[in-house]
Image (cartoon, grey):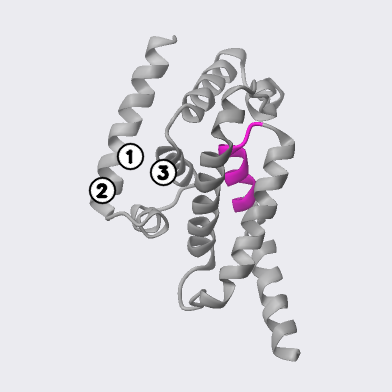
Amino acid sequence: MAATDGRREAFVTAIEAHRGVLQKVARAYCWSDADRDDLVQDILAQLWRAYPSYDPTRPFATWMYRVALNVAISWLRGHAPRQALTVAFDPLVHDVGAAGLDPAAAERLRALLAAIRQLAPLDRALVLLYLDDHSHRDIAAVLGLSESNVATKLHRLKQRLRRRLESHA
């Protein structure tokens, strides 16, 4: 019983230290608060089930991102038809003006967030990790890609996003 309590305590401590990962992933893959809450619960359940296989010699955040993104992408596949019929309301997108940005910067940020939302799930994960200042090595570890593949994909995604944003300007 004590080993289970210790394991549970270590898990909760690690989750609390990296709670932002859960919110970022849920925000990137879900449009409604209810869906975000459901996805976070699914991610937490999967993290707990997978926790015995976690290698403590590796960064917890990298492992957590990998599990969270895999769950989110699987969740999206199952919910894509319903989500396609849902109008997205993301407070971050709609309330960008509250961040104290000038109107032009707020509009550019809204356009960027909307463009990111339209990316394929793996590409969205790649951009999410990049914007979270993860190294190419960390992104490769999370997504199961080579570092050179990460660099190439990021370069192409940046170009695609830039073109999309220029065409809407």
Query: Looking at the image, is 20 positioned above or below residue 109?
Result: below
Q: Are marks 1 and 3 in contact (CB under 8 Å)?
A: yes
Magenta-span inclusion, residue 28? yes
Q: In which quarter of the image is residue 1?
A: bottom right
Q: Are marks 1 and 2 in contact (CB under 8 Å)?
A: no
* Front residue of 147 and 50: 50
Query: Looking at the image, is 77 positioned above or below residue 95?
Result: below
Identify the residue position indicated by label 1 in the image.
154
Residue at the (56%, 16%) spot, across then down: 107
Query: Looking at the image, is 31 positioned above or below residue 141?
Result: above
Other residues around mark 3 within 10 Å, as few (<14) / some (14–19) / many (≥20): many
Q: In this view, does 36 lie to the left or right of 119?
A: right
Which range of residues does the magenta coloring cover? Answer: 21-31
Instruction: Please name the amino acid that badge 1 sits on.
Output: Leu
Give the mark nearest the N terminus, 1 or 2. 2
**Residue 82, image x, y percentages:** 61, 29
SS of the residue under disc 3 = helix
Identify the residue position indicated by label 3 in the image.
126
Give the mark nearest the N terminus, 2 or 3. 3
Disc 2 versus disc 3: distance between alpha carbons?
A: 11 Å
Instruction: Please name the amino acid that badge 3 sits on.
Output: Leu
Disc 1 versus disc 2: distance between alpha carbons?
A: 8 Å
Instruction: Please name the amino acid that badge 2 sits on.
Output: Asn
Which residue is farthest bottom? 2
Q: Do the residues labelled 2 and 3 touch (CB within 8 Å)?
A: no
Label annotation for residue 149: 2
Dominant secondary structure, magenta: helix
Q: In which quarter of the image is residue 4?
A: bottom right
Magenta-span inclusion, residue 131? no
Residue at the (51%, 19%) spot, across then down: 111
